[in-house]
Image (cartoon, rainbow, N blue to C red):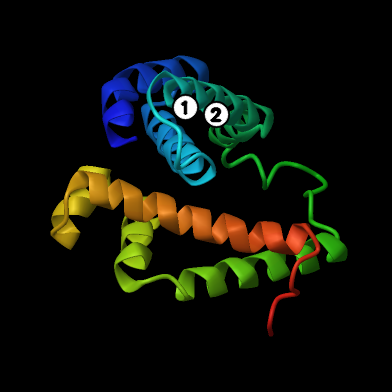
């Protein structure tokens, strides 16, 4: 599987970059595709694995674009500082605030349960904005390991959150 990913990485990155327009997001989506395919299809190889990677990446980029993240990020830049001028500030409903607090608590618990290196890799990459190369140097690991640690951390958090949405175990607390 590693050989297929290594051989297709640049092509996957180009595809994702063309679709989402941002190198950092493209790298994250390619890494997510690799982890998802590796978990779902550990026994697949060769051309079949390559096709699965491209289909998964396509689906991830579609979901990313549908999420409105790009529009939201662009709007926040275009309208920064306008909040004081708007007559009626948009606020979350009490229900939404409660749901968000619950999701945040679950995510925090998932992060706290991560092995230390994965937790640190996630913090450095996602919170401090370091590149995978910088994370790898800081943690004295390879770039591949840094990417894997971040991807595994994100997968663990997503799994924990999806269990709640899917009617799984309620959060402790």
Determine the residue positioned at 53% across, 69% down: 110
Asked if marks 1 and 2 touch (Cβ < 8 Å), the reply is: yes
In the displayed orientation, state which residue is furthest to the bottom.
173
- The quarter of the image holding the C terminus is bottom right
Q: Residues within 10 Å of mark 2 (few under 14, many from 20)?
A: some
Location of residue 37 in the rendering, given as x and y in whole percent from the top left corner? 49, 37
Residue 126 lies left or right of residue 137; in this view the side is right
Residue for badge 1 = 53
**Residue in the foreground of this view, choosing between 131 and 88:** 131
Report helix, strand or loop for mark 2: helix
Left or right, residue 145 beside residue 113: left
Residue drawn at 47 percent across, 27 percent down: 53
How far across and down, in percent of the image, does residue 50 sit? 42, 22
- Residue 143: x and y, percent? 21, 45
Q: Nearer the viewer, residue 5 or 76?
A: 5
Is residue 17 shown left or right of residue 3? right
- Most distant residue in the front direction: 43
In the picture, the disc for residue 82 is none
Instruction: Give the CA separation, mark 1 to mark 2.
Output: 5 Å
Rendered-image quadrant of the N terminus: top left
Residue at 49% in and 21% down:
54
Q: Is residue 116 above or below residue 167?
A: below
Q: Secondary structure at mark 1?
A: helix
On screen, residue 13 above or below 38: above
Image-quadrant location for residue 167: bottom right
Q: Which residue is mark 2?
A: 56
The residue that appears at 71% across and 70% down in the rendered structure is 102
């Amino acid at each position: 599987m590693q050989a297929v990913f290594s051989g297709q990485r640049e092509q996957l990155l180009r595809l994702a970059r063309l679709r989402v327009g941002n190198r950092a997001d493209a790298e994250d989506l390619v890494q997510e595709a690799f982890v998802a395919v590796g978990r779902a299809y550990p026994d697949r190889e060769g051309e079949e694995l390559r096709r699965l990677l491209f289909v998964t990446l396509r689906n991830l980029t579609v979901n990313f674009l549908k999420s409105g993240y790009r529009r939201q990020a662009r709007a926040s830049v275009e309208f920064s500082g306008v909040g004081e001028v708007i007559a009626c500030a948009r606020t979350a409903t009490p229900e939404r605030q409660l749901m968000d607090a619950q999701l945040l608590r679950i995510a925090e618990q998932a992060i706290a349960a991560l092995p230390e290196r994965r937790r640190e890799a996630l913090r450095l990459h996602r919170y401090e904005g370091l590149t995978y190369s910088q994370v790898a140097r800081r943690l004295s690991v390879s770039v591949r390991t840094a990417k894997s640690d971040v991807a595994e951390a994100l997968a663990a958090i997503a799994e924990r959150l999806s269990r709640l949405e899917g009617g799984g175990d309620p959060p402790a607390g």
